[in-house]
Image (cartoon, grey):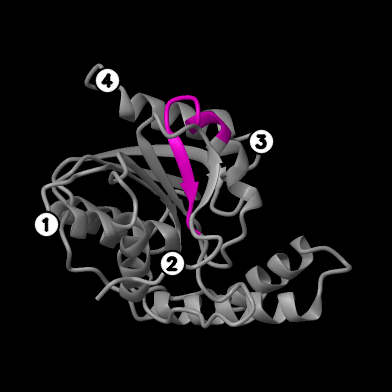
Amino acid sequence: MTAVAVPGRPIRLAGGEDRPGCLILPGAGGGLTPYVGLASVLGRSHSVDFVRPLGLMPGEEPETTVEEMAESVLGIVNRTATAPQLVVGWSLGALVAWEVCARLAEDEHRPDLVIVDSLPLPRVPEPGEDEWIRDKMVADLGPKADPQTVARMVRTFVAQAAALTDYATESSYPGRVLLLVCRPYDKAGREAAVRRWRELAPNLDLAHLDAGHHDVFEPAHLPQLTEAIHAFQNQDGR
């Protein structure tokens, strides 16, 4: 089955066609703004595309499983001339990135994969956590946000949060993987998550970031994030 092209997917953030491809897959909510700084740095060596989730534009329905989200991204990849050499995902986006890369590996293509603070196990939200995230996303839209835009974003987030509670991957990935863990390092379930990632990824590197989960893309933390990705990409002299 041929995937149908959707306007605004992907969005080119940086770089030109003559550079290796990079995909950025966002966390729940799917807003573009947090990733612009990262894309500007990665764009020095890559052509950087951002893949927004479905559900944010009029007439779109949110995807309801991680596997469905990955299938949608693979449809985008299949319409391009070349597969990406680097895939970066944060939180939910990292799980989508994982499934995308696992599928690409079946065709002998193994992009470098950067997982930013994500768990390969069913998510158990803390009391009030989803409400806090939802309210923060709505606030980030600004006081004059269109009510329909707000409604689409909230509906998409609810679908994504449900997908996370139902997800536990069994897919392995033989390519190079960088797992970046945010503070607090001793958060409940973190040790089990890292252990599971190591079981699934034989070529995994682990690094810790000083940022928390929700401020990892803030300007103050961007240098550490980009330096970790750069070191990972260049560890074999690339």
Q: Amino acid at mark 1?
A: Glu
Q: Amino acid at mark 3?
A: Pro
Q: Nearer the viewer, mark 3 or mark 1?
A: 1
Residue 133: x %, y % from top left? 64, 69
Please tell me whether mark 3 sits on a helix, a strand or a loop.
Answer: loop
**Among numbered discs 1 and 2, the one appearing first in the sequence:** 2
- Report, in whole angstroms, how far the alpha carbon at label 4 lies from the one at label 1: 24 Å
Residue 120: x %, y % from top left? 30, 64
Residue found 70% across the figure and 82% down from its top: 151
Q: Nearer the viewer, mark 2 or mark 4?
A: 2
**Among numbered discs 3 and 1, the one appearing first in the sequence:** 1
Q: Amino acid at mark 2?
A: Ala
Indicate left or right for 178 with 39 as reference. Answer: left
Q: Residues within 10 Å of mark 2 (few under 14, many from 20)?
A: few
Closer to us: 234 or 120: 234
Circles 2 and 4 in contact, beta carbons < 8 Å: no
The residue carrying mark 1 is: 106
Quadrant for the N terminus, please. Answer: bottom left
The residue carrying mark 2 is: 5
- Report, in whole angstroms, how far the alpha carbon at label 1 lies from the one at label 2: 23 Å
Question: Which mark, by number, is residue 219?
Answer: 3
- Report, in whole angstroms, how far the alpha carbon at label 2 lies from the one at label 4: 33 Å
Q: Residues within 10 Å of mark 3 (few under 14, many from 20)?
A: few
Q: Residues within 10 Å of mark 1 (few under 14, many from 20)?
A: few
**Among numbered discs 3 and 2, the one appearing first in the sequence:** 2
The residue carrying mark 4 is: 238
Residue 5 occupies quadrant: bottom left
Q: Residues within 10 Å of mark 4 (few under 14, many from 20)?
A: few
**Among numbered discs 4 and 1, the one appearing first in the sequence:** 1
